[in-house]
Every structure is written in structure tokens, then in C-alpha cells.
Amino acid sequence: MTAGLPAGAAAEYWENRYRENGRTWSGRVNAAVAREITGIAPGTALELGCGEGGDALWLAAHGWSVTAVDIAPSALAVGAAAQRPGDDITWVAADLADWQPPASYDLVTSSFLHSTVELPREAILRRAAAAVSPGGQLLVVGHAGAPHWATEHAHDAQDLPTPDEMLASLELAPGEWDVVTASLAERPVTAPDGSASSIVDSVLRLRRRERPVPA
């Protein structure tokens, strides 16, 4: 099921990009998501900026009830087409710049929420943290640096925060969260010329306490 139709310049940019490129991503789960979430009892999950749904499909296959949100309907259509019978996924087309999570979730995750057009990333991730249920978890995965072959669309270093910088930007209330993972993780990738290479990700996973500890 897909709901919502975002409008605006950012929506047009991303919809055109996905429509023109056809399938953009591999369809596989991001390595950091699989590593961090494997072993956690499934429940409700919210994925922000799901793209073509690789992470959402993996979560659903592992028993999660997933709400997957992205600005580009064409990207969501790729994920919906790959959805297996029994997968519990709701695909939502929405602009995260102003979209509000309608509920709380056992897991909120976002992988590579970077943009070449304006994106209020910190505000989006603060809303993401607010949507985590007590006892639930927040997972944010981002690029820690541009790949060596990137030129025209390389992200400015200021747009690629470290795990500690991501944590500080969330402005979390003292005593409410535990840091599970705050690390840089290198993963292998294949460069456009077919050569083997690697890239480094920032990985931040937090658990919201059932009962906050008084400051």
C-alpha cells in the first residue's frame, strides 16, 4: 500500500532522478542495518528515506511491520514491486522536510539521508528520535566521506557528520537514551570502473530507556 503524494522542488528533483535512472540501487539491505538489527526482536519499524526499499524489504522479511517513507513515488514503486507475500510494509510518499510520524515505533531507522538539494536533516532526525517508543531503538547510518571517485556530486565535509556529531545534533534529553553503537565502519564497494574499493560509514544506534534516569 502506498499513501501520499509530495509536491515541491525537492520532490520533483528526486522523482525525476529515480524515474530517469530506472533501478538505482541493488535492492539489498545496507550492511550496517543488517549488522545492527540482526538479533533484535521484531516489532514496528519506521524507515525514513527508504529509496527503493532494500532495508524495508529486509526488515519485513525478518518479521518487522514496516512503514517506509520516501519523497519519490517511482522509488517506492520499485520496492512495492519487490514486496513478497506476507511482507507487512506500508509505502508512504512524503517529503520528510515537513512529514510528521503518526505513531511511535520500536525501531526508527534512516540510511544515507543525504541530499544534493536542500534537506533539513537534523530536524528530520530529531523527529525520528521523538518517534521511538520507550525501549525502542534509533539507527542512523550516513556517509563519513565521499568515495575517491566522486567529483561533481561529492558531499561537503560539513554534510557528513561523525557519529558523535550526529548524536550531539539530536539534542536528546539527558538520562533518556543509551548509546549502543557510535562508530565508523568501512565496507567494500565496487568503483564505477569495476575496481575494488571501500567507503566509510558513520553508524549511530541508540536505545531509548524504558524509564528515564533523573539528570
Image (spheres, helix red, strand yellow):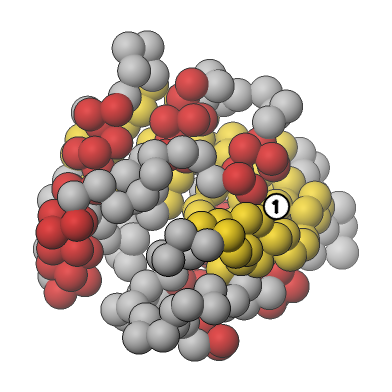
Residue 110 in view, yes or no: yes
Q: Residue, x 73% and y 27% (percent of image)?
A: 39
Percent of width and height locating residue 91: 28, 37
Q: Is residue 213 left or right of residue 142?
A: right
When the figure is inspected, residue 197 is found, relative to residue 26, above or below; the finding is below
Q: Nearer the viewer, residue 185 or 214?
A: 185
Q: Is residue 100 left or right of residue 162?
A: left
Quarter of the figure with residue 3: top left
Percent of width and height locating residue 98: 31, 64
When the figure is inspected, residue 14 is found, relative to residue 155, above or below; the finding is above
For disc 1, the neighbor class at 10 Å (few under 14, some 14 to 19, many from 20) is: many
Residue where numbered disc 1 is placed: 205
Q: Is residue 164 left or right of residue 148?
A: right
When the figure is inspected, residue 150 is found, relative to residue 211, above or below; the finding is below
Element assignment for label 1: strand
Percent of width and height locating residue 211: 79, 42
